[in-house]
Image (tube, grey):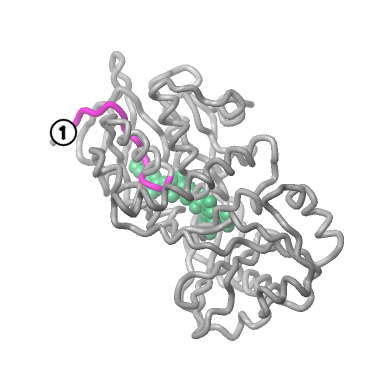
Amino acid sequence: MKTNYDVAIIGGGIIGCSIAYYLAKEKIDVAVFEEKQIASKSTRAAAGMLGAHSECDDFEIFYPFARSSQLTYFDLKDELRELSGVDIELRKGGIFQLAFSEQEKEELSATLSLPTVSWYDSVEMRNRENAVSSNIFGAAYIEDDVHVLPHSTCLAFSKCAQIYGASIFEYTPVFAIQKEDSIYIIKTNKGAFQAKTVVVANGVWSSSFFHQLGLHHTLSPVKGECISVSSVQPLLKHTLFHEHCYIVPRNNGRLVIGATMVKNDWHEQPTLGGLESLIAKAKTMLPTVTDLKIESCWAGLRPQTFDKKPFIGYHPEDEGILFATGHFRNGILLAPATGQMIRDLIVKQEVKKEWIDAFKVNRF
Ligand code: FAD
Ligand code: GLY
């Protein structure tokens, strides 16, 4: 078995797999070590919205980075399908971000000032989606905030990375990273591997590697619970979004309702209380939602940093170690931009200074 690589990536979620894809495409010899299966944790739980506008709380840093990632997806979907045969199901439709009062419209004013966003009053909105609550005041329509299937997207990245020569090791937890001369030894249940560079990309579980590598950074879990329901006739053509709750239309009349925000809960099962609050919120947007049949429910852990922005960059004292973790509510959206940024740092291509500064590990 080959045990020597240029780059070792720890974690086979959407972030690790996107990085593997962009590096392997540059003919860099890369291996991904995944404790369970590819796309089995937070990535699998996600709704898959590419909410560059609807999730934006910072127009200076988050928005340009997220928007560049969102735009990348529009071409990437074909590239990934042609190479891997996997359809990431990026469908047109976009998001209606609902306002239930004049004040809520006011709160959307920064979003509404963007040329990619338009305002629909209550009547116009209900002409587009007639099952929406008659209590709405109006909605911001964002055509580009489409969605993908997160699990398929991660698998497509991983398959394409393999086609470009990457090695993917599933059921291979990394226990430790040690430095010997200028080479890193990656200790796993399948023995020791060597790499010149290591990328820590194991989501909310990255804290242990920060600590092993002499840093005090901690990621906290913010659990999100979701329910999937089905209807015979498709009820929605667009995603509905209000505060942190959303209803995403999938194929065959399926709707994904998400998601709760439960801080510091490491349990990956949904609770009845969580689902109850979710159903109550969904009902305010789409009153008939309670008539629909439950298909399944699940939960996942969003990896949150102290300022809710990801860590993307070098270990402050070791240029052989990089971190790409803490993508919180937007790992699916930010995966292409993160993969490209890590690739550019490793191959010494120029990266925007404001992104280096905003996401660097020692930005306290
Ligand atoms: P993960 O997907 O958790 O992957 C980390 C991987 O590392 C795991 O597979 C784990 O098994 C592995 N691992 C852990 N420790 C080790 C180790 N020691 N050795 C080897 N492997 C290890 N984002 C969006 O952009 N849009 C959305 O609509 C959206 N909706 C969401 C809805 C919910 C309910 C939740 C919970 C999240 C949502 N997110 C969304 C956020 C998104 O899911 C995350 O930001 C993203 O999945 C993080 O990806 P990741 O690769 O960093 O982490
Ligand atoms: N971005 C949607 C969520 O985290 O629930």
The quadrant in which the C terminus is found is top right
**Residue positioned most to the right:** 102
Q: Which residue is mark 1?
A: 2
* Observer able to see residue 211: yes
Q: Is residue 64 left or right of residue 161?
A: right
Q: Position of residue 67 (x, y in %)?
A: 58, 43
Q: Which residues are magenta?
A: 3-14
**Residue positioned most to the top:** 181
Disc 1 crowd rating (10 Å Cα; few below 14, some 14-19, many 20+) is few
Which quadrant of the figure has residue 305?
A: top right
Name the foreground residue: 126 vs 214: 126
Q: Is residue 127 left or right of residue 166?
A: right
Q: Secondary structure at mark 1?
A: loop
Name the foreground residue: 275 vs 355: 355
Q: Position of residue 239 (x, y in %)?
A: 60, 66
Above or below, comparing residue 317 to residue 84 in the picture: above
Is 5 inside the magenta-drawn segment? yes
Q: Position of residue 319 (x, y in %)?
A: 42, 19
Above or below, comparing residue 122 to residue 91 in the picture: below
* Observer able to see residue 223: no
Which quadrant of the figure has residue 265?
A: bottom right
The disc labelled 1 sits on which kind of residue?
A: Lys
Q: Is residue 48 left or right of residue 164?
A: right
Q: Is mark 1 within 8 Å of ligand 1?
A: no
Q: Residue at x 59, y 61 (%)?
A: 94
Is 101 inside the magenta-drawn segment? no
Q: Residue at x 63, y 61 (%)?
A: 95
Q: Is residue 234 left or right of residue 281?
A: left
